[in-house]
Image (cartoon, grey):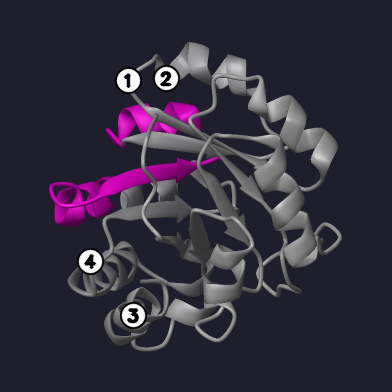
Amino acid sequence: MISVPRLYPIVDAAFFSTAEAVAAFAEELVAGGCTLLQYRNKSGNARVMLEQAPELKRRVGGTVRLIMNDRADLALVAEFDGVHVGQEDFSPESVRGIIGSGLWLGVSTHNPEQLAEADTSSADYLAIGPVFATSSKDRPDPVVGLEGVRRARELTRKPLVAIGGITRANAASVIEAGADSVAVISDLLREPRKSAEEFFRVLR
């Protein structure tokens, strides 16, 4: 079974205007101790993604595990280390057929039914959320709260990543509820290196 680090930063391209800015942000996170990063670009612009993803790989790929959100095909092109898919994307088994057995596969879930189904798949880790209210999605799923994390922990032995509105102020409570890792977007944007270091202090 894989081991997911306590902090799972998501590098959301929506907050950056260039491939250089995306990579520079990632470098700051790595300097702060991060060993895994997910690259997320919901614009659907493959040309932009094929500028940003290879630059990320070039700049930090030797030191961290890189996960591509949604796009298994681009993960292969950019030589990333894994793919993370949601409920509206290809099924986990379809993605596994594309990426093979060597890359990590993560699946987002939003309720006990989805999590139980994903647990039977070949996914390496599962995500549950949103734990708290979040501003990083246009149409977020209903908040599951800490109780949702506890329930998810009961339903799977796979590594569990909690996501949604997680900050330095509430991250410890999410781990205590049973998550192995917390996925964070917004609370890393300002001073990413310092923010990451503070997360790791909270999550010891």
Is the Cβ of the residue at disc 1 closer than 8 Å to that at disc 3?
A: no
- Is residue 109 in view from this perspective? no
Above or below, comparing residue 55 to residue 30 in the picture: above
59 displayed left or right of 130: left
Which residue is under mark 3? Answer: 201
Q: Earlier in the sequence, mark 4 or mark 3?
A: 4
Question: In whole angstroms, how far apart are the C-alphas of marks 1 and 3?
Answer: 32 Å
Q: Nearer the viewer, mark 2 or mark 1?
A: 1
Residue shown at the point (28%, 45%) measured from the top left: 65
Which residue is under mark 4? Answer: 30
Which residue is under mark 2? Answer: 99
Question: In whole angstroms, how far apart are the C-alphas of marks 4 and 1?
Answer: 23 Å
Is the Cβ of the residue at disc 2 closer than 8 Å to that at disc 3?
A: no
Question: In whole angstroms, how far apart are the C-alphas of marks 2 and 1?
Answer: 7 Å
Name the amino acid type tagged 4.
Val
Residue shown at the point (81%, 41%) measured from the top left: 112
Name the amino acid type tagged 2.
Ile
Regarding mark 1 in the picture, which secondary structure is present there? loop
Above or below, comparing residue 198 to residue 174 in the picture: below
Badge 2 crowding class, 10 Å Cα cut-off, few under 14, some 14 to 19, many 20 or more, is: some
Which residue is under mark 1? Answer: 102
